[in-house]
Image (cartoon, helix red, strand yellow):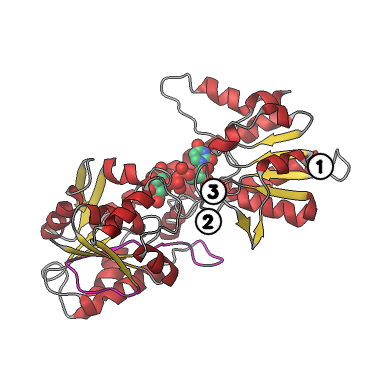
Amino acid sequence: MKKICVLGLGYIGLPTASILATQGYQVLGVDINPRVVDLLNKGRVHIVEPDLDTVLSAAVKSGHLKAARRPANADVFMICVPTPLLPNSKKADLRAVKAAAESIVPYLRSGNLVVVESTIPPDTTEGLVIPILEKSGLRAGSQILVAHCPERVLPGRILTEMVQNHRIIGGLNAKSLAATSGIYKSFVKGEIFETDLKTAELTKLLENSYRDINIAFANEVSQICEQSGIDPWRAIELANKHPRVRILSPGPGVGGHCIAVDPWFLVERFPTQARLIRTARLVNDDRPEQVVARVVSAASHLKNARICCLGITYKADVDDIRESPALEVAQRLKKRFGSSVAISDPFVPSLDGKRLPSWKKGIANADIVVLLVDHREFRSIPLTLLRRKTVIDTRGVWKSLEKN
Ligand code: SAJ
């Protein structure tokens, strides 16, 4: 059976490595973080994702999955490292991709396949990755096969979507496409669509930009409604009764390591053309400040208002606080109101080394309750607990309450 080396054991690499191992491949997961490596070798996960712990521990027990800090010889190398934005800029930070590609150069052999799953700007595979791989002395296309197969799984549903979703594979040539399709067909139930490298790179960015623009529209609708005293949730619900309208949900902004980041890769490459994409990013990035302004205004009507922020993850039912607009709101409120602000999140037990209170305690002590994340647990909070409180519900969970 083929040996596969998966570089990067995060939200994508870890489930990918686990699923491949359960298909019988001999998988080596590589990560620069020793804690992640140690945990995996003990059969444990470092992130919260439904069912991942079960699949991973089974894979490790079977002897098909191991982790290390450095790569080793393999038939296939999969690059699943993060591609955030460079600090204080809206430009792609490709340092992890570069480092991962460089790390496998000493282990490349003729006939190997290298697949990039990380989200990257168009031309990155040909312009950055392939020149690095060719430092091995092997020629891409003939001696090393190269493909880009962008991940498209939704955090919170990763294991299901990794198997069920259709996949786009961009290949350097027909041989690269055939080899890559062979690997993905072993565990993907969705259809596999083949194309060239650049189209695959662009397609992934289009998907996330499309969603960002649609969320920006919902957020703009919400602002229009707030301005005119209309309930945005009701207006959207009614507009969505049209057979060709499907407005998404407004919220405190867009977070996570994908949608808040990837559209900028297009703006960076196509500054003149990507006008709508840039505007959507700006609209969504403005949201946390708008929520803060609502809370400040509510607090100005109360004496020494105590505020409880419910939820700081970037979306419901995940533990990820990267690029989280909810966290941004909570931190800005904390900066302004200090110890009068309590934060509670069932997925984040502590923040900055301090334990966070339960939502029950947070709500009980508060005058203003700000719902920032629609975790399932928050949806079932008894509304009686919110009586006589000022409620700012940024997710439309307690619709009936806000009207009162
Ligand atoms: N959000 C809203 N309103 C909505 C939907 C989402 O405010 O109606 C917010 C969420 O609260 C969150 C953000 O947008 O802060 C993004 O959440 P999401 O669930 O839309 O997407 P992600 O970032 O968790 O995952 C996305 C997915 N892309 C698309 O749906 C096009 C996923 O399929 C990708 O694999 C993933 O990005 C990625 O890794 O690129």
Which is nearer the N-term, disc 3 or disc 1?
1
Instruction: Say what secondary structure mark 2 lies in.
Output: loop
Disc 2 residue crowd, few under 14, some 14–19, many 20+, Cα 10 Å: some
Which is nearer the N-term, disc 1 or disc 2?
1
**Image height check: is 267 above or below 41?**
above
- Residue 322 is labelled as 2
Percent of width and height locating residue 202: 33, 52
Residue tagged by mark 3? 314
In the figure, is residue 174 to the left or right of 76?
A: left
Which image quadrant for residue 101?
Answer: bottom left
Dot 1 beta carbon under 8 Å from ligand 1: no
The quadrant of the picture occupied by the N terminus is: bottom left
The answer, for residue 208, to whether it is visible in the render is: no
What residue type is disc 1 on?
Ala
Separation (CA) of disc 2 from disc 3:
7 Å
Residue, x 79% and y 39% (percent of image)?
A: 367
Dot 3 beta carbon under 8 Å from ligand 1: yes
Residue sitting nearer the eye, 76 or 209: 76
Query: Do callouts 3 and 1 mark residues in contact (Cβ within 8 Å)?
Result: no
Dot 2 beta carbon under 8 Å from ligand 1: no
Residue sitting nearer the eye, 221 or 385: 385
Query: Do callouts 2 and 3 mark residues in contact (Cβ within 8 Å)?
Result: yes
Residue, x 50% and y 43% (percent of image)?
A: 317
- Residue 158 is labelled as none
Residue, x 20% and y 79% (percent of image)?
A: 136
Percent of width and height locating residue 222: 61, 33
Region in magenta: 69-90
Which is nearer the N-term, disc 2 or disc 3?
3
Instruction: Say what secondary structure mark 3 lies in.
Output: loop
Separation (CA) of disc 1 from disc 2:
28 Å
Residue tagged by mark 1? 299
